[in-house]
C-alpha cells in the first residue's frame, strides 16, 4: 500500500501509512528520516540538516498542530552560510553550525562562524562569531514566511501559499482568520520589509567578537511544555545509568528526554499527563500507545501510568449496551493479510493490566481504588464481547469473525492480572476470570498451534470458519508477555513449555531476528517487505516485548541477541530510537536503514528503550506486599551496569548487575523486603 498523507494531529490516527485523504494523488507523504526534529509538545520544530527553513515539506516551527513559521532563511554578507553540522542536542533543542566566506577572506579558512540554536518552543538564537584580526561590518538578513497551515494539511501537500506579512513591533506578523503568528527579534532589526518578509541588521564584529540575534515565534497560546514542569517522569539527570557499555547511559538519557518531551495534558484535567504517540504525525491521543508507553516506563514512576489511566477512564464509553466500558480508538493497519485491528480494544484490554502492574510498582492504594471501577468496566465489556468459544474476535466491517492470536494474548493477560487485582482489592469476579483464562489457554494451545516439519509455529489468526492464518511475525512475541503477578511471579502463558521453546527458537532465528531487532514479518512469508510497517520493518516496541518475554521464559540467548541488535541500532540513530526502521539484514559494516515515514521520537520507542535497559536487571516488585525480587539475566548482556533514579514503592530505587550477572539492590524504600 502506498503511503498516504496522515490526518491532522489530534485524531489519534495510526502510525505509518494512514487512511487516504479525501482527494489528490497518493505518495505525497514527506520523508522525515533525515530531518532534525525538536519536540516539547505542544511545540515542534522540523528542520533540514543544514538548518535553513525553506518551507519545503514539513519544515517549520509548529505550535498546537499549526505551522507558525515555514521559512527562516539567513544570509550574511549577501551569502548563504555554508552548513557544516546540524544535530539534535536534546529532545527540544538542535544546533546548526555554518561558516561564511567573504570576499575579504585571504585563504580557504572561513573567518565567520554561525551557530543557530533552535528550540521547540519557538525560540532561535543566531550567533555570529568572528575569528578575523580586523573589525567587520556585515549585512545580515533573515527572510521569513508563514502559511499558518495545519500540520495535517502540510503533510498532505495542501498547505497553500505564504501569507502576506505586516511589520509588527520588532518583527513580522501574519494573520489568517482567527489564527495569527508574530516573530519578534532582539536586537530589533534596522530595517523591515513586509512585502518580502525580510528583517535586516548591520552587524559589527570586533576582532574575535560575536553578536547574537534572537527570534521568538509566538501565536498567543501557552507554549510551556508539560514535561518541563511537574513531570510524572524523572529528568534524564535523575534517571541515569553507568557501566561498561557507553551506549547504555546514552540510550537511557535520550529515551527519558524524548518521552518527557512527548507528554501532553488532558484538557479535561490538566494535572493528568499522558504520552502522545509520536512526532511529526501523531501528536494527538492514541490510547493503546499511551498505555504501552506508561507500562514500559513503570520502572521510573507510576505517575505517568496514573495520569494516563485517569485520562482514558474519562473516555470510556458509558451506557448499558454492548459497547459500555470499551475505550474508543481508531483502527490500525495489521499488515497485508490481516484486517485492521481496533486500538481501542487493545487499550481496553491493557487498562486493567497497567493498573495491576502499576500497583505492583507502588501506585498508592487510594489511586488504585479511584481507577478500579474503570478497570472493572473494561472487564465487564470483555466478558460480554467474548464469543462462546472464549475467544475475542476482531471488530470492524472487514474482520468477519477473524480471531487474532495477539489479541488473545492481550485477553489472557487482562483476565489473569484483572483477576488478581479484583481479588486483592476485595471485589467479586476473580474466580470467573481465572477460569476464563484457564479455558482460553487449553483451547488456544490446541487450536492455534500448527505442527510442521520445523517444529511448529503459532498461527497469526483463525478465520471465522476455523482455518488458520499461518503467518509468522513479531506479533507472536506478545504470547510471551504474560504480565506480573504478586510475589514477583509471572503469569502463566498461553503456550505450553514445548511450544514456548519452539517460539523462542523462531523469534531468535534469522527469519525474524534481523540483527537490528525483530522483524514485523518473517523474511520468507508472502508479502514480506523490509519497509512494511507491519510487514517486515523492525518495530522497537515489539522487539522490547520479545526481549522481556524471552528472558522471563528462560531463553536468554535469543533475548540477548535482540537486545544487542536494538542497542546497536540506537547508536546509529543517535540513541533516539524511531518507532520503526527497515528490516534489512545486518551485515558486517552495515547500519540500520531508516523508514522515511517513521515517527521519531515515538513514545513506545522511547519507553521501549527504558524497558530494554531495565530488563537485564529482572526487577519484579510487589509493593503491596512490601517486597521486591531480582531475576537478572545471567549472561549480563550489558556488562556491569548500575541503574539509578528508578522507583519502587514510591521511593528511589538503585540496582546494580555485575559482569557475572549477579544483581544487587543499592537503594530502596525503608522496610522493603529484598529477595532473589
Image (cartoon, rainbow, N blue to C red):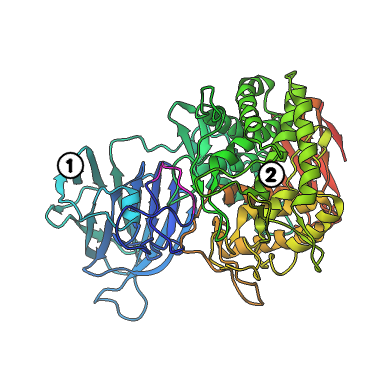
* Mark number, residue 26: none
Residue reaching furthest bottom? 107
Q: Residue at x 46, y 60 (%)?
A: 597
Q: For the residue carrying disc 2, how many other residues have a C-alpha within 10 Å: few (<14), some (14-19), or many (20+)?
A: many
Q: Where is residue 613 in the image (x, y as percent from the top left)?
A: 70, 51
Residue ranking furthest to the front: 465
Write down the region rendered in magenta. 9-15
Q: Main secondary structure of the magenta part?
A: loop
Q: Which mark identifies residue 408? A: 2
The answer to which image quadrant residue 102 occupies is bottom left
Indicate left or right for 528 with 423 as reference: left
State which quadrant residue 438 falls in. Answer: top right
Q: Which of 401 and 436 is in front in this view?
A: 401
Closer to us: 648 or 491: 491
Q: Which residue occupies the foreground of this view, 555 or 131? A: 555
Q: Earlier in the sequence, mark 2 or mark 1?
A: 1
Q: Position of residue 255 (x, y in %)?
A: 58, 49
Task: Give the percent coordinates (x, y) of residue 93.
Answer: 44, 51
Residue 576 visible within the image? no
Q: What element carries label 1?
A: loop
- Residue highlighted by disc 1: 169
Q: Within 10 angstroms of label 1, few (less than 14), some, or many (20 or more) residues?
A: few
Instruction: Based on the picture, tell me whether residue 341 belongs to the magenta stretch.
Output: no
**Whole-number angstrom distance, CA of label 2 to CA of label 1:** 61 Å
Cβ atoms at labels 2 and 1 below 8 Å apart: no
Amino acid at each position: 500500500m502506498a503511503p498516504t498523507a496522515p490526518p491532522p494531529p489530534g485524531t489519534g490516527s495510526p502510525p505509518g501509512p494512514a487512511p487516504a485523504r479525501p482527494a489528490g494523488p497518493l505518495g505525497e507523504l514527506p520523508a522525515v528520516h533525515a530531518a532534525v526534529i525538536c519536540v516539547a509538545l505542544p511545540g515542534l520544530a522540523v528542520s533540514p540538516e543544514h538548518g535553513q527553513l525553506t518551507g519545503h515539506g514539513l519544515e517549520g516551527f509548529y505550535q498546537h498542530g499549526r505551522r507558525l513559521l515555514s521559512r527562516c532563511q539567513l544570509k550574511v554578507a549577501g551569502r548563504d552560510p555554508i552548513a557544516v553540522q546540524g544535530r539534535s542536542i536534546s529532545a527540544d533543542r538542535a544546533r546548526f553550525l555554518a561558516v561564511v566566506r567573504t570576499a575579504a577572506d585571504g585563504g580557504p579558512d572561513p573567518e565567520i562562524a554561525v551557530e543557530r540554536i533552535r528550540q521547540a518552543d519557538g525560540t532561535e538564537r543566531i550567533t555570529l562569531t568572528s575569528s578575523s584580526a580586523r573589525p567587520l561590518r556585515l549585512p545580515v538578513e533573515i527572510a521569513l514566511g508563514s502559511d499558518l497551515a495545519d500540520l495535517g494539511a502540510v503533510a498532505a501537500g495542501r498547505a497553500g501559499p505564504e501569507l502576506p506579512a505586516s511589520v509588527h513591533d520588532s518583527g513580522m506578523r501574519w494573520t489568517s482568520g482567527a489564527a495569527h503568528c508574530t516573530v519578534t527579534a532582539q536586537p530589533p532589526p534596522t530595517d523591515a520589509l513586509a512585502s518580502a518578509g525580510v528583517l535586516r541588521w548591520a552587524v559589527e564584529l570586533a576582532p574575535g567578537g560575536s553578536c547574537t540575534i534572537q527570534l521568538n515565534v509566538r501565536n498567543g497560546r501557552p507554549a510551556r511544555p508539560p514535561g518541563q514542569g511537574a513531570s510524572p517522569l524523572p529528568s534524564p539527570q535523575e534517571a541515569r545509568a553507568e557501566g561498561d557499555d557507553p551506549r547504555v547511559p546514552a540510550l537511557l538519557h535520550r529515551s527519558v528526554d524524548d518521552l518527557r518531551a512527548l507528554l501532553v495534558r488532558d484538557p479535561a484535567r490538566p494535572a493528568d499527563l499522558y504520552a502522545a504517540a509520536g512526532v511529526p504525525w501523531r501528536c494527538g491521543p492514541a490510547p493503546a500507545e499511551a498505555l504501552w508507553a506508561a507500562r514500559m516506563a513503570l520502572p521510573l514512576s507510576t505517575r505517568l501510568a496514573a495520569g494516563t489511566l485517569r485520562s482514558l477512564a474519562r473516555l470510556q464509553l458509558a451506557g448499558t449496551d454492548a459497547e459500555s466500558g470499551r475505550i474508543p480508538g481508531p483502527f490500525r493497519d495489521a499488515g497485508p493479510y490481516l484486517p485492521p485491528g481496533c486500538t481501542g480494544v487493545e487499550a481496553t484490554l491493557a487498562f486493567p493490566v497497567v493498573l495491576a502492574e502499576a500497583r505492583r510498582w507502588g501506585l498508592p492504594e487510594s489511586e488504585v481504588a479511584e481507577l478500579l471501577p474503570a478497570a472493572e468496566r473494561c472487564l465487564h465489556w470483555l466478558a460480554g464481547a467474548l464469543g462462546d468459544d472464549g475467544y475475542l474476535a476482531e471488530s470492524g466491517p472487514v474482520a468477519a469473525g477473524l480471531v487474532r492470536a495477539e489479541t488473545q494474548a492481550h485477553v489472557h493477560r487482562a483476565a489473569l492480572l484483572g483477576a488478581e487485582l479484583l481479588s486483592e482489592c476485595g471485589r467479586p469476579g476473580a474466580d470467573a476470570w481465572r477460569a476464563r483464562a484457564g479455558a482460553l489457554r487449553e483451547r488456544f494451545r490446541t487450536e492455534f498451534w500448527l505442527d510442521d516439519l520445523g517444529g511448529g509455529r503459532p498461527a497469526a489468526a483463525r478465520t471465522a470458519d476455523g482455518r488458520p492464518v499461518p503467518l509468522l511475525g513479531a506479533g507472536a512475541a506478545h504470547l510471551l508477555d504474560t504480565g506480573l503477578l504478586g510475589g514477583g511471579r509471572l503469569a502463566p502463558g498461553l503456550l505450553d513449555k514445548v511450544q514456548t521453546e519452539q517460539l523462542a527458537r523462531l523469534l531468535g532465528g534469522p527469519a525474524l531476528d534481523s540483527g537490528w531487532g525483530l522483524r514485523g514479518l518473517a523474511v520468507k512469508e508472502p508479502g514480506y517487505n523490509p519497509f512494511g510497517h507491519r510487514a517486515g520493518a523492525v518495530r522497537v516496541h515489539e522487539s522490547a516485548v520479545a526481549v522481556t518475554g524471552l528472558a522471563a521464559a528462560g531463553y536468554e540467548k535469543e533475548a540477548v541477541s535482540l537486545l544487542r541488535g536494538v542497542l546497536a541500532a540506537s547508536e546509529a540513530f543517535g540513541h533516539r530510537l524511531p518507532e520503526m526502521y527497515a528490516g534489512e539484514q545486518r551485515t558486517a559494516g552495515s547500519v540500520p536503514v531508516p523508514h522515511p515515514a517513521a515517527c521519531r521520537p515515538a513514545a513506545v520507542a522511547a519507553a521501549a528503550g527504558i524497558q530494554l535497559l531495565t530488563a537485564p536487571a529482572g526487577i519484579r516488585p510487589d509493593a503491596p506486599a512490601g517486597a521486591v525480587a531480582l531475576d537478572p539475566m545471567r549472561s549480563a548482556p550489558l556488562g556491569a551496569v548500575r541503574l539509578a533514579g528508578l522507583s519502587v514503592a514510591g521511593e528511589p530505587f538503585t540496582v546494580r548487575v555485575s559482569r557475572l550477572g549477579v544483581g544487587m539492590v543499592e537503594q530502596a524504600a525503608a522496610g522493603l523486603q529484598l529477595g532473589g
